[in-house]
């Protein structure tokens, strides 16, 4: 029955592979259960309540994706948008977190309308095939860059912006942390080369166990004040009733304290970034999973976009910032996930995390970062099929993949890719290949940078 409903055999997969892929996706994105409450608490929200809302929003969104689109994509409150929520909307703009949640809710309603009326699908299909390859590769580089940071291999530098971390300084904490990231990467590579099913997942677990042994041997020495806690799994109680602090608070409004113009700007900003982060992630992960058709289109994309919109509305009601499709879904795809059953497993683990959240979020970054770095390698492979002799196609794709990791933004990468695609081909006298929607998107992106 499961095989028939999710078309597992039809997509040349099996239940064991889908289960492993679902677990892998969860492990690579479980950090959001800890990171999201930490960020949104700076907006004045109860971190305990936010943690529950984060897990429930992920459950709703991921199950919707599985049942409405049958894709191995997982959803959760998006990084970047939660920082915009806390530090810009509730910080410099002075909005209450309740009002910010209401803006997220309105954004979700607008997305539902756009998804039902095929506007978002039309935007997805309007992006040229070669540019989609650039998006896929750009997301791969972006994911790898995040992995390098989370694993402690690269760090900020005032002169060069980023630089490689020192392994000798603070060897027993940050040095070992970065070393374990490298060890995990080599383990995953070796397992993948030997065609071990679930290589990414098993690499995460093996690396975590190696880290535990290093702590037992005294090679790794926890220093909580420096941000390096114990590697051992933890177990603590969890009060699910805390969600009442944020549930439904998006409707507790005081419109007299804000201007309509500011509120519309906030909604548009959420709308803009979420739309193109989601589209970029769907293109990248679907491309890696081999789910795009010969025209570079994603069948059943309406269901995928609708699941994303429903999750955003649900998350706002529960008490969290915009919920979106996670790039980390690529880790499960790399482990062979091709159907919504993988998403069912991921969603189920998020549901289980309500009881076991402290245990799951105790998985250290050095165990999940190697998976992100390796998945980045897998995702850049579409650039091998780029037609590099056709500069009108390949240069915008190159700019797209270059901008994403350097600006830390999927949507900015897509924006530069589309604007450059239109300008390069327009100036080169190849305007026939440009659709009206591409012109509209290019103008909107340029207005965004000029006015916002």
Image (cartoon, rainbow, N blue to C red):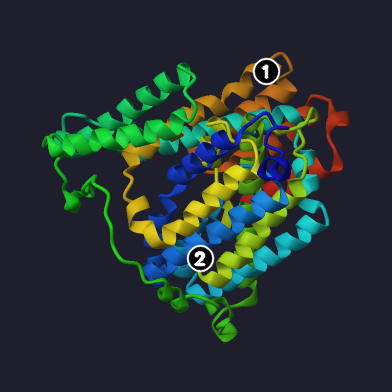
Q: Residue at x 53, y 70 (%)?
A: 318
Q: Residue at x 78, y 28 (%)?
A: 425
Picture coordinates of residue 440, whole percent (x, y) = 79, 47
Above-or-below relation of 71 to 133: below
Q: Residue furthest front?
A: 1
- Disc 2 is placed on an element classified as loop
Upstream in sequence: badge 1 or badge 2 = 2
Task: Give the camera-side residue of 73 and 258.
Answer: 73
Give the quadrant of residue 306.
bottom right
Residue annotated with mark 1: 385
Q: Residue at x 76, y 50 (%)?
A: 302
Q: Residue furthest left?
A: 218
- Disc 1 is placed on an element classified as helix
Lateral position of residue 138 relative to residue 189, left or right? right
Q: Which mark is residue 366?
A: none
Above-or-below relation of 275 to 41: above
Q: Residue at x 35, y 36 (%)?
A: 205
Res. 326 in view: yes
Picture coordinates of residue 289, whole percent (x, y) = 63, 32
Q: Residue furthest top?
A: 389
Q: Which mark is residue 320?
A: 2
Res. 403 in view: no
Picture coordinates of residue 360, whole percent (x, y) = 37, 51
Above-or-below relation of 383 to 205: above
């Amino acid at each position: 029955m499961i095989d028939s409903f999710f078309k597992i055999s039809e997509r040349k997969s099996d239940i064991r592979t889908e289960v492993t892929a679902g677990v892998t996706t969860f492990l690579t994105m479980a950090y959001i259960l800890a990171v999201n409450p930490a960020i949104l608490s700076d907006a004045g929200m109860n971190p305990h309540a936010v943690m529950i809302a984060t897990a429930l929003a992920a459950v709703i969104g991921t199950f919707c994706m599985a049942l409405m689109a049958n894709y191995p994509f997982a959803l959760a409150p998006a990084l970047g948008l939660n920082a915009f929520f806390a530090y810009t909307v509730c910080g410099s703009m002075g909005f209450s977190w309740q009002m910010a949640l209401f803006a997220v809710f309105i954004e979700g309603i607008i997305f539902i309308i756009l998804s039902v009326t095929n506007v978002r699908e039309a935007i997805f299909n309007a992006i040229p095939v070669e540019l989609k390859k650039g998006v896929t590769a750009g997301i791969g580089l972006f994911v790898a860059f995040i992995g390098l940071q989370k694993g402690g291999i690269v760090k900020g530098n005032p002169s060069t912006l980023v630089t490689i971390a020192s392994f000798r300084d603070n060897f027993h904490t940050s040095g070992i942390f970065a070393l374990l990231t490298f060890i995990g990467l080599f383990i995953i590579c070796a397992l993948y080369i030997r065609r071990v099913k679930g290589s990414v997942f098993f690499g995460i677990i093996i690396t975590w166990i190696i880290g535990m042994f290093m702590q037992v041997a005294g090679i790794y020495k926890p220093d909580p004040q420096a941000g390096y806690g114990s590697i051992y799994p933890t177990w603590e109680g969890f009060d699910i009733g805390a969600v009442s602090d944020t549930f439904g608070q998006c409707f507790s409004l005081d419109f007299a304290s804000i201007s309509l113009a500011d509120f519309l700007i906030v909604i548009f900003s959420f709308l803009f970034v979420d739309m193109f982060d989601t589209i970029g992630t769907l293109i990248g992960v679907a491309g890696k999973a081999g789910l795009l058709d010969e025209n570079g289109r994603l069948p059943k994309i309406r269901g995928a976009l609708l699941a994303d919109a429903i999750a955003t509305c649900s998350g706002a009601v529960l008490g969290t910032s915009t919920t979106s499709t996670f790039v980390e879904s690529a880790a499960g795809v790399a482990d062979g996930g091709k159907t919504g059953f993988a998403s069912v497993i991921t969603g189920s683990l998020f549901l289980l995390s309500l009881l076991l959240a402290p245990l799951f979020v105790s998985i250290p970054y050095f165990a999940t970062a190697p998976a992100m770095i390796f998945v980045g390698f897998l995702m850049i492979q579409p650039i091998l099929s780029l037609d590099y002799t056709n500069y009108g196609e390949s240069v915008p794709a190159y700019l797209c993949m270059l901008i994403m990791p350097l600006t830390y933004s999927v949507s900015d990468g897509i924006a530069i890719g589309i604007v450059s695609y239109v300008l390069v081909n327009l100036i080169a006298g190849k305007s026939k290949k440009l659709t009206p929607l591409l012109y509209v998107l290019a103008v909107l992106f340029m207005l965004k940078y000029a006015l916002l």
